[in-house]
Image (tube, helix red, strand yellow):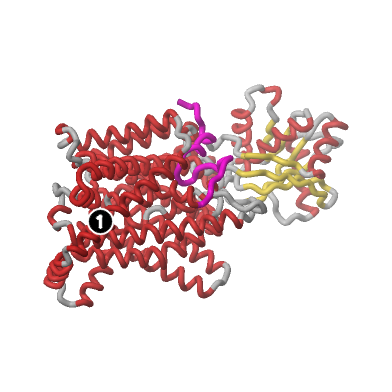
């Protein structure tokens, strides 16, 4: 179960995959995002009809305007500033440091989990609906919506337990075939409308009967369009797969301009193509399908374009369309699950907020599959019932991306962009709030994910508190000379831990005299000071750079870290490995209650430093003779 750690996750499609060795042209990578984005055509027109009724085309136009004028500019900015595949969450992580930023990221991870998990369950449920409604489907399919959906989800789990390769090649074929079939259905539908123009009159008459005032039509469309927010999915995925895009030859890791340009083309092309399909499919389905067929139990429920494919092109073509839809919806679930498998290892272990096994793919697959089963059973594999939860996850991620680019523009004092992105924050914030009010189940599911993530994170952080946390340790030339000199000439390395104060000569003189007296350090034995300067204590993993200084004639090792005892333990072990001499370190007892000091350590990285340092060393080095000694007086 622990084979196939997260370093293999790059072979999976989806957001937050690791940088692949082989990259692809932007349009091929667009197909990878398209299995999630474009596959919503399988259910989006039907959900729009249920949400907006006869107003569906107008509400869809509002959605398209929001896509092109709001979401697209926001994520083009995200692509420029977060080009390593971390998406907008990484931008907010940089802009909001310390514990507040970590908590905000955990909340966003909860909504991201909602987005991806509902993508898995909703896509599987809609794929099942297409299979059941096919005229050639076996009779026992009817009434078996839940078992069939669970089977598709289980099939996803099997695929990921065995490994998933050549994802982009499969995605290109699926997306290309699916878009061609949808284009054929929509063109045929418009030809039918042209031959039977009375359907336009019938629709308009019914619409004006319900809403006689044109301003009311516009106003209600503005109020209703948040229910259509499923059509905004795919943008976060688009920036997350940026490492898959081939850049220019002169691209650098710090500034991959070619890759950024390709990502912007990907986002713009996907948004324009999807906008065209959203508007045309909404018009065709609204004009040609009776409203009652969109409701629960109707033949067009969750499969409006498939309904038109069977009606106007026959069951043969309709079956081909159904197979294409089922396949791309299933693959969309695969992409979402892969995104989740890469999202969790990217953040939580680095925060110290994930169990050890969370770095492996297979255990996470089983956990997420079990969650998908529970969601499917809770919603009875109903596409409409899951639409609100899906929209909530999508909208929260887009709103957070808007906040990220707004803060970025504000920080860089770009006044016009700050105003523009501020408007985007307001619009997407309004859309999110309205969707939550209308469909609160999305927040409930997200709250469960958030609560689970936070609880697991806290327990994991406490459990891993005594681990060595540094990903690397380096001693500069002066620091290395200090420790090597003592090891070579005296066969001992003695270090006094000093909490920096005013940095005066008196401070060091007093500290050294106190330690020699209290700890019995021989007068002729050389010592050096070790000082840890505070940094972001919410970071669990960090690179340590130890620098040597001569301060008032005293040798001082200085390092910056968010955690004092673990950092000291790591440096002591590094000195032992570099010099071959096991060092000694000297502390003073910390004043205050041991319990309050322990809580301070968990939150701020300081507290009862001496005993925690000793415990970290004890766990890191089992052999007593090779373990640095901790002296406390």
Verify whether residue 574 appears in magenta. Answer: no
* Viewer-proximal residue among 220 and 299: 299
Majority secondary structure in the magenta region:
loop
Up-down relation of residue 439 to residue 113 (above or below): below
State the residue at coordinates (56%, 35%): 466
The magenta span reads: 1-26
Residue 122 horizontal side relative to residue 245, left or right: left
Measuring from the top left, give residue 456's x and y in whole percent. 42, 39
Say whether residue 311 is left or right of residue 366: left
If the image is split into quadrants, where does the C terminus sit?
Answer: top right
Position of residue 219 measured from the top left corner of the image (x, y, whole percent):
25, 73
Q: Quadrant of the N terminus?
A: top left
Q: Secondary structure at mark 1?
A: helix
Residue 243 x/y as whole percent: 55, 47
Residue at 88% x, 32% y: name it: 489
Q: Is residue 218 above or below residue 196?
A: below
Answer with the quarter of the image where residue 573 lies.
top right
Residue 179 showing in the rendered view: yes
Q: Position of residue 413 (x, y in %)?
A: 56, 71
Instruction: Name above or below for residue 572 compared with residue 227.
Output: above
> For residue 20: magenta?
yes
Q: Is residue 236 left or right of residue 129?
A: right
Which residue: 23% across, 57% down? 189
Front residue (pair 586, 101): 101
Query: Which residue has dot 1 on it?
Result: 188
């Amino acid at each position: 179960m622990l084979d196939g750690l997260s370093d293999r996750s790059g072979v999976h499609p989806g957001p937050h995959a690791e940088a692949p060795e082989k990259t692809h042209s932007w349009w091929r990578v667009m197909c990878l995002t398209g299995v999630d984005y474009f596959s919503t055509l399988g259910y989006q027109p039907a959900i729009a009809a249920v949400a907006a009724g006869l107003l569906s085309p107008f509400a869809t136009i509002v959605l398209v305007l929001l896509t092109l004028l709001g979401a697209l500019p926001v994520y083009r900015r995200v692509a420029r500033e977060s080009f390593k595949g971390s998406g907008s969450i990484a931008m907010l992580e940089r802009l909001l440091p310390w514990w507040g930023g970590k908590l905000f990221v955990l909340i966003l991870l909860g909504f991201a989990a909602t987005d991806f998990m509902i993508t898995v369950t909703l896509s599987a449920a809609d794929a099942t609906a297409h299979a059941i409604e096919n005229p050639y489907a076996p009779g026992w399919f009817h009434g078996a919506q839940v078992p069939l959906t669970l089977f598709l989800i289980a099939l996803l789990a099997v695929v990921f337990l065995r490994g998933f390769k050549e994802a982009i090649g499969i995605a290109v074929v699926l997306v290309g075939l699916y878009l061609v079939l949808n284009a054929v259905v929509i063109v045929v539908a418009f030809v039918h409308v042209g031959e039977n123009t009375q359907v336009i009159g019938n629709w308009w008459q019914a619409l004006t009967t319900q809403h006689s005032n044109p301003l009311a039509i516009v106003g209600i469309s503005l109020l209703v369009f948040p229910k259509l927010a499923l059509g905004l999915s795919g943008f976060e995925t688009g920036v997350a797969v940026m490492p898959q895009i081939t850049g220019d030859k002169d691209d650098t890791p710090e500034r991959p301009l070619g890759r950024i340009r390709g990502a912007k083309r990907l986002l713009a092309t996907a948004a324009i193509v999807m906008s065209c399909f959203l508007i045309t499919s909404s018009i065709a389905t609204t004009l040609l399908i009776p409203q009652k067929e969109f409701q629960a139990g109707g033949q067009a429920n969750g499969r409006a374009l498939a309904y038109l494919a069977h009606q106007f092109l026959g069951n043969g073509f309709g079956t081909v369309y159904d197979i294409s839809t089922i396949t791309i919806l299933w693959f969309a679930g695969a992409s979402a699950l892969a995104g989740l498998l890469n999202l969790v290892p990217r953040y939580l272990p680095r925060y110290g907020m994930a169990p050890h096994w969370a770095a492996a793919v297979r255990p996470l697959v089983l956990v997420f599959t079990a969650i998908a089963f529970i969601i499917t059973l809770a919603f009875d594999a109903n596409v409409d019932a899951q639409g609100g939860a899906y929209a909530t996850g999508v909208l929260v991620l887009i709103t957070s991306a808007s906040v990220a680019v707004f803060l970025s523009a504000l920080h860089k004092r770009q006044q016009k962009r700050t105003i523009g992105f501020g408007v985007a924050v307001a619009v997407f914030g309004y859309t999110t709030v309205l969707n939550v009010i209308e469909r609160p189940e999305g927040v409930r599911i997200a709250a469960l994910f958030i609560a689970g993530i936070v609880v697991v994170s806290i327990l994991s952080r406490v459990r891993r508190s005594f681990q060595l946390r540094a990903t690397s340790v380096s001693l500069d030339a002066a620091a290395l000379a200090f420790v090597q000199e003592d090891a070579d000439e005296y066969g001992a390395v003695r270090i006094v831990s000093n909490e920096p104060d005013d940095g005066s000569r008196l401070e060091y003189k007093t500290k050294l005299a106190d330690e020699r007296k209290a700890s019995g350090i021989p007068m002729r034995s050389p010592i050096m000071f070790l000082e840890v300067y505070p940094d972001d204590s919410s970071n669990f993993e960090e690179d340590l750079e130890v620098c040597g200084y001569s301060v008032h004639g005293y040798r001082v090792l200085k390092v910056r870290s968010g955690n004092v005892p673990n950092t000291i333990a790591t440096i002591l072990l590094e000195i032992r490995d570099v010099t071959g001499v096991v060092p000694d370190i000297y502390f003073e007892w910390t004043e205050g209650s041991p319990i309050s000091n322990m809580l301070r350590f968990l939150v701020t990285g300081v507290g009862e430093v001496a005993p925690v340092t000793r415990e970290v060393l004890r766990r890191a080095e089992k052999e007593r003779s090779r373990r640095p000694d901790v002296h406390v007086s």
